[in-house]
Amino acid sequence: MLPGVYIDKKKNGELNYRASITIDKKHISLGSYTSEIQASAAYSLAKKIMEDTSYSCLNYQESSPLKYDKYVSLINLRDNHLYFSNPIYIRRRDFSYFYSPFEELKFDMDDLFYFSQHKIMCRGNHYFVAEYGMQTSIKERFGIRSFSVEGRDFVFVNSDSLDFRRENLKIINHFYGVTEIEKKLRKQYKATIHVKSNYVIGVYQTEKEAAIAYNKAADTLTKNGFDKEFFQNYVEDLSNKEYAEIYSRLKISDRIINLKPSLK
């Protein structure tokens, strides 16, 4: 057998060629191949990467015998002496998760443990990880709710929508139906609810009050007979008693209080 190549048999009897390399006493699998030549090419490239710093995460070739995630992992091992099975490259203050040669997600070092343990997946423009049998959105992990609209509810400061470093994320509106406005040179919060068209619930002094006012409007419309599942805002850091007190004293628009479903 060629160096770095091992052979085994599949259940159907076909031969399978595995490539691996040992670096600093650590055995690293490089992948399985249908031919000894392919497996040997993967091993040879892995050796070159570990010896030649001209190989970087940004000059990957599609014809490479190594998968891209393995390619990135080896470069990180070479430069930082740390091996991750996920395609992570670390720097002094942050790190990148290279989903593909053209998709580089950036994170703070505080998130390194999490993303070294969770593989990022993508469907359309939606990046997520599998966690406890569910899909966890990358955006939601950083406080960007599923209903949020870029430019209105949040912005990426440097316009890079894959840069999730906290200094690059500015969350404007944390709650559904709530928009920050400026009134008399002061920040206030307008709550709006949609029932066939948008209805203004009211303007409030704090974001949490506006979020609770939205919930109150949704409850009112449900009681009025509207057959619609209204989103409910979850407001953290409030006890049930505190929430109930705010809910009780908040005023909402008379238009919403008196709004009834149209008869068919």
Image (cartoon, rainbow, N blue to C red):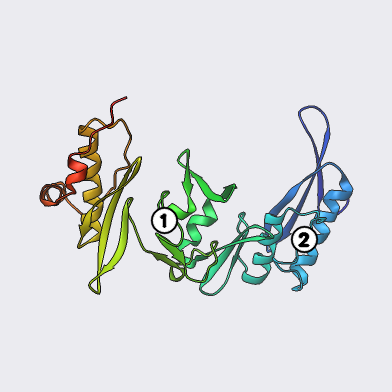
Of residue 58 and residue 253, the one placed in the foreground of this image is 253
Q: Secondary structure at mark 2?
A: helix
Which amino acid does the dot numbered 2 rest on?
Answer: Ala
Q: Quadrant of residue 217?
A: top left
Of residue 128 and residue 57, the one placed in the foreground of this image is 128
Looking at the image, tell me whether mark 2 or mark 1 is earlier in sequence order. Answer: 2
The image position of residue 162, as x and y in percent, is 55, 61
The image position of residue 229, as x and y in percent, is 33, 35
The image position of residue 83, as x and y in percent, is 62, 61
Dot 2: within a 10 Å radius of its alpha carbon, few (fewer than 14), some, or many (20 or more) residues? many
Residue 144 numbered tag: 1
Vertically, is 29 above or below 75? above
Residue 1 in view of the camera = no
Q: CA distance from mark 2 to mark 1?
A: 39 Å
Q: Answer left or right for 180 relative to 159.
A: left
Query: Which residue is labeled 2 in the image?
Result: 46
